[in-house]
Amino acid sequence: MIITHAVDPHGNSRIYLGGKASIECWIEPSQEDASWTFHMQEGLSGTHLDHHQKHQWAIHILKALADEIGVAPSDLKGVPYHAIMNHHTPDPFDGRRAPAPRKQSYDTAYVATPPHRPPPRKDQPKSPHAILRSRAR
């Protein structure tokens, strides 16, 4: 399973689960404690799925996540957000051609960012979003 930690320009964190498909699934950290909430949304170019199919997909994704991090599905909710974040999958596009979204989407998009990333060098733009914007010019 691909586990991708991503951050938006405002510093909000998400962990996307699985690849791009008819349904995109992710978890977001709770504001109160180390727990998290599960979210899913139909993909932009995916096939329409009915409620039952979406429910089955959510179960499949959560079972795959539990398997990936080595816990029983019944214990998954007790795993802290940051522990899941540490299972970030290395970039599958490393050394490969990556699709380039519209330039203006960089201002609002969640960009894959490995956890505990070192701070940028002084000669480098400050955020992954600024890096992508500078490359798009």
Image (spheres, rainbow, N blue to C red):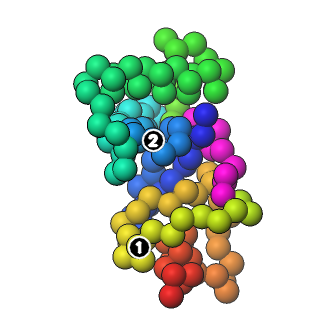
- Write the residue at 36% across / 66% down: 108
Vertical placement of 137 versus 1: above or below? below
Q: Which residue is mark 2?
A: 21
Q: Pick the quarter of the image with the N terminus.
A: top right
Label 1: few (<14), some (14–19) or many (≥20) C-alpha neighbours in 10 Å: few
Residue under the point 34% across and 51% down: 44
- The magenta region covers 84-93
Q: Amino acid at mark 1?
A: Arg
Residue at 45% x, 51% y is: 13
Nearest to N terminus: mark 2 or mark 1: 2
Q: Secondary structure at mark 1?
A: loop
| Residue in front for this viewpoint, 87 or 35 | 87
x, y percentage for residue 28? 41, 41
64 vs 14, nearest the viewer: 64
**Magenta region, mostly helix, strand or loop?**
loop
Q: CA distance from mark 2 to mark 1?
A: 20 Å
Type of amino acid under label 2 = Ala
- Number of callouts: 2
Q: Which residue is mark 1?
A: 102
In this rendering, position of residue 50 left or right of residue 114: left
List the single residue furthest toward the right. Answer: 95
Residue 113 visible here = yes
Q: Is residue 30 magenta?
A: no
